[in-house]
Image: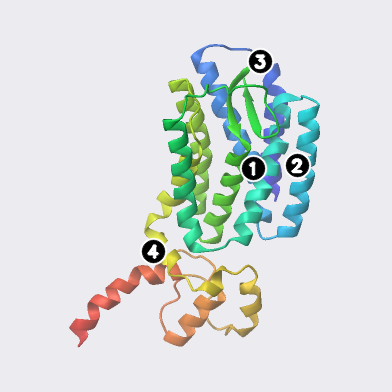
């Protein structure tokens, strides 16, 4: 939680101080302002990630953040409301990640939303990278250095899906450190590409790529997980039935083994592997069977 608080404070400090920085209207200054704004919006959204398994706390925090965001938007404080809006969007994403813990959703949803978002932008009329109309509670305005205007915008849903994908990445061990870093960089890339093309570009395809590409070799094992592993709280219910002598970490990646994985190891006498790495070695065992026969 300390890192999350530090990230949130950093975002608050950036959006409070960006209007006081030396102004710049050059192309380089626009890219710096846009990418830095996207970076701090992403960090603010990820501040709640450590609480991903506390749905009631996240829900209460999300309601409070949403109310405060609406008040700030009504007061027309501009980009200073971005961290609060990012938190409100992230809370919704974390609740969705907790409630819909199904491997097929982890693979299918990013592909669907990325495809829809990309198609809507590429086939629809081009929208200016700075957006149209005044910023509201559903948009995160990225201001120019020194204030005086907006360089680009992100949507509240971008923060929702960032938190959702980050929570799934951690829950299912989809190389979260690399994946989450790529997702945040994806927000910056979407803004930078929009500035280069002078039109708004979707961030969801970048977020989906950050979730799925680093863990492409683990998706097969993910989809092979037993259904009981995907029910929130199932791990807690099974904890008392696992033999304490069974190793509690995967010997390949060091990830914490869940009770069903420990039970499978105990029954089969196989090496202590998480379900993802157990699925990766399965084809080797199948190839050896005919030779052994």
Across and down, in percent, residue 265 comes to 46, 81
- Between label 2 and label 3, give the one nearer the viewer: 2
Across and down, in percent, residue 4 comes to 67, 46
The disc, 1 or 3, on the residue closer to the chain's N-terminal end is 1
Q: Is disc 1 in contact with disc 2, using a CB cutoff of under 8 Å?
A: no
Q: Which residue is mark 2?
A: 66
What color scheme is it? Answer: rainbow
Q: Which residue is mark 1?
A: 45
Q: In the figure, is residue 293 to the left or right of 188?
A: left
Q: Residue at x 67, y 34 (%)?
A: 11
Q: Is disc 2 in contact with disc 3, using a CB cutoff of under 8 Å?
A: no
Disc 3 is placed on an element classified as loop
State how far apart marks 1 and 2 are (Cα): 13 Å
Q: Residue at x 43, y 43 (%)?
A: 115
The disc, 4 or 3, on the residue closer to the chain's N-terminal end is 3
The disc, 2 or 4, on the residue closer to the chain's N-terminal end is 2
Q: In the figure, is residue 79 to the left or right of 124?
A: right
Disc 2 is placed on an element classified as helix
Disc 1 is placed on an element classified as helix
- Between label 4 and label 3, give the one nearer the viewer: 4
The disc, 2 or 3, on the residue closer to the chain's N-terminal end is 2
Disc 4 is placed on an element classified as helix
State how far apart marks 1 and 3 are (Cα): 24 Å
State how far apart marks 2 and 3 are (Cα): 27 Å
Please rate how many residues cluster around mark 4, counting C-alpha atoms within 10 Å: few if below 14, some from 14 to 19, many from 20: some
Q: Which residue is mark 4?
A: 220
> Is residue 204 shown to the viewer in this render?
yes
In the picture, which quadrant includes the C terminus? Answer: bottom left
């Amino acid at each position: 939680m300390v890192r999350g608080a530090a990230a949130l404070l950093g975002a608050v400090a950036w959006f409070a101080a960006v209007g006081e920085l030396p102004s710049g209207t050059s192309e380089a200054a626009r890219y710096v302002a846009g990418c830095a704004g996207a970076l701090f919006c992403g960090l603010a959204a990820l501040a709640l990630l450590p609480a991903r398994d506390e749905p009631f706390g996240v829900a209460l925090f999300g309601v409070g953040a949403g109310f405060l965001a609406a008040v700030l938007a009504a007061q027309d404080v501009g980009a200073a409301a971005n961290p609060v809006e990012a938190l409100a969007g992230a809370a919704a994403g974390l609740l969705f990640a907790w409630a819909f813990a199904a491997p097929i959703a982890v693979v299918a949803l990013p592909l669907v939303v990325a495809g829809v978002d990309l198609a809507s932008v590429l086939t629809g009329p081009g929208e200016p990278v700075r957006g149209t109309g005044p910023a509201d509670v559903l948009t995160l305005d990225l201001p120019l250095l020194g204030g005086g205007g907006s360089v680009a915008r992100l949507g509240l849903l971008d923060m929702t899906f960032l938190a959702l994908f980050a929570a799934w990445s951690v829950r299912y061990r989809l190389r979260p450190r690399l994946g989450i870093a790529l997702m945040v960089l994806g927000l910056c890339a979407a803004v930078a590409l929009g500035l280069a093309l002078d039109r708004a570009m979707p961030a969801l395809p970048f977020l989906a790529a950050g979730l799925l590409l680093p863990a492409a070799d683990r998706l097969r094992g993910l989809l092979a997980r037993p259904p009981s592993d995907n029910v929130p709280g199932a791990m807690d219910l099974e904890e008392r039935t696992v033999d304490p002598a069974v190793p509690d970490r995967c010997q390949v990646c060091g990830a914490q083994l869940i009770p069903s994985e420990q039970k499978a190891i105990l029954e089969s006498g196989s090496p202590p592997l998480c379900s993802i790495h157990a699925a990766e070695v399965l084809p080797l065992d199948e190839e050896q069977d005919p030779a052994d026969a």
